[in-house]
Amino acid sequence: MDDPSLIFAVVIGTLLLVIMVSIMGLLLVVNASRRHKHRAELAEADLRRKQEVLIADRDSREQTLSIIGRELHDSVGQLLSAARMGFSTVPDYTDEPRIMAMEALKEAIEEVRLLGRMLNSEQWKKRTLAKAITDEADRTSRIAPVQVEVVLEDVPVDPYTDTKIILYRSFQEVLNNALKHAKANHIRVRMSGAARPTLSISDDGCGFDPGAVTEGTGLLNIRHRCALIGYDATLVTAKGTGCSWTFSPHVHGNIRSADR
Amino acid sequence: MGSAEIYRIQLLLSMSIALVLWMRIPVPRRPAFRVVGLLIGAGLLVELVGAALAMRSVNNVVLYNVYGLVDCLMVLWICYLMVPARVLVVAIGAALVVSAMAWDFVSRGADPNVFLGRGIVLSAVVLTLVLMAILWQLAQTSAVPLQHVPGFWLFMGLLVYFGCMSPIFTIIDRVYAQDHALAQRLYQIMPLLGITRYALTAFACKLERGTAHG
């Protein structure tokens, strides 16, 4: 290649080729990055939509429970109170059946009030999670053949209402499962941490093989609800060893702090 | 057989392959690809007639001048059909191309037998800008990977052709008087650009065949 004109032509041709290939590469990279961003946006929108559906679902359930709670308190509670007042008008009854009936009425009124409070989400603004869990544990210990032990560690600050409601409902679901399916005799509840507490619930029930059982709506709901408040719901179980649930906040999780 | 003839045969071959692949796209074709067929057919016809005229030593400059303008306008038409959102860019591009060719024609004494080199260079610059805008739009909006989009390869072929044409023609114009050999060497790049253009058009037609319904 001694011909300088040929060398010049080759240089020009190569230069143009490099420019064109660079443009092509740039366009491919821009397109790939755009598509990646678009996919991420779609995934985020999908997650937002799912969260909105879950929030709407939870709000609707809470509203229904609040209505039931109010009805229990205002209607059934009032009727029971009226019955108790009726009994009170009878002077100095001493017979055993009447005394027992009076005691049962008193207990029924207490139960209805407690239930009403637990179901009414408005009450959550006044009630702490630790108190709600302790009350429910006491109530369950009274009415079911199971001992529910609650251990509270470092809980000076109450969580946000959203977190409280979801952790409490999850606790109720786990408690119900332990009674209904696992036939547990002893349930241990441990709550630790401050504004974003960790809740652990373990039972001595029959447990189950997680590989053999497909997750039902209950378990899935627990996980979805916890994801809403930026919590992980972890279940450790095996046949014959009981179940152990841990509800812990994500380390860098999405925290829903709105106090609704 | 000289290198010019070899290049011409290669160019005709790449055009023929592009035309065959275009014909294999199932009917009905997308409007843009109907014009692509017209563009390949017109190009092939002009090259064949131009070669035949050259062999008979008849001046074929008029043919190439007219084809230069028609080629540019057809490319702009394809741009519009492929990316209608860029209609303003395409319309301005068409106006500039026509103006550039008219200016060159008038400035050379309105002699149809003079090659409108400056008009074609200016048109190529305009087309390069339009094609880059179209390709940028495609890169920003295409939901499928760009390498699977027929339009991308079609426009890349056109960009290579028109994008390289203007600097090469400009250099040729500058050095022609001083270094005729260099001008000749540089001119040899042009058929290579044509071959690249039609090879990429052929690939776009192949992709279009794979993606077209029918």
Image: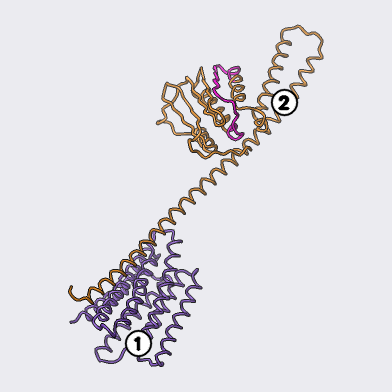
Chain colours: A orange, B purple
Residue situated in front as seen by the camera: B70 or B45: B70
Q: Which residue is mark 2?
A: A76
Rendered-image quadrant of the N terminus of chain A: bottom left
Q: Is residue A122 above or below residue B120?
A: above
| Residue sitting farthest toward the front | B178
The magenta span reads: A140-165
Residue B100, percent from left and from top: 43, 83
Q: Secondary structure at mark 1?
A: loop
Left or right: residue B27 versus residue A103 is left
Q: Examine the structure image and report whether residue A150 is included in the region drawn in magenta.
A: yes
Label 2 resides on the chain identified as A
Q: Residue at x 65, y 27 (%)?
A: A127
Q: Position of residue A75 (x, y in %)?
A: 74, 28
Q: Is residue B73 above or below residue A237?
A: below
In front: label 2 or label 1: 1
Q: Residue at x 39, y 67 (%)?
A: B151
Give residue B109's position: percent from left, percent from top. 40, 93
Q: Are marks 2 and 1 on the same chain?
A: no
Look at 62% across and 34% down and name the residue there. Answer: A161
Could you tell me the amino acid type at mark 2? Val
Q: Compute the Cα span from label 2 to label 1.
A: 102 Å
User: Which part of the image, by quadrant, shows the C terminus of chain A?
Assistant: top right
x and y, in percent, of residue B158 in the image: 36, 72
Q: Which residue is mark 1?
A: B115
Q: Is residue B75 left or right of residue A157?
A: left
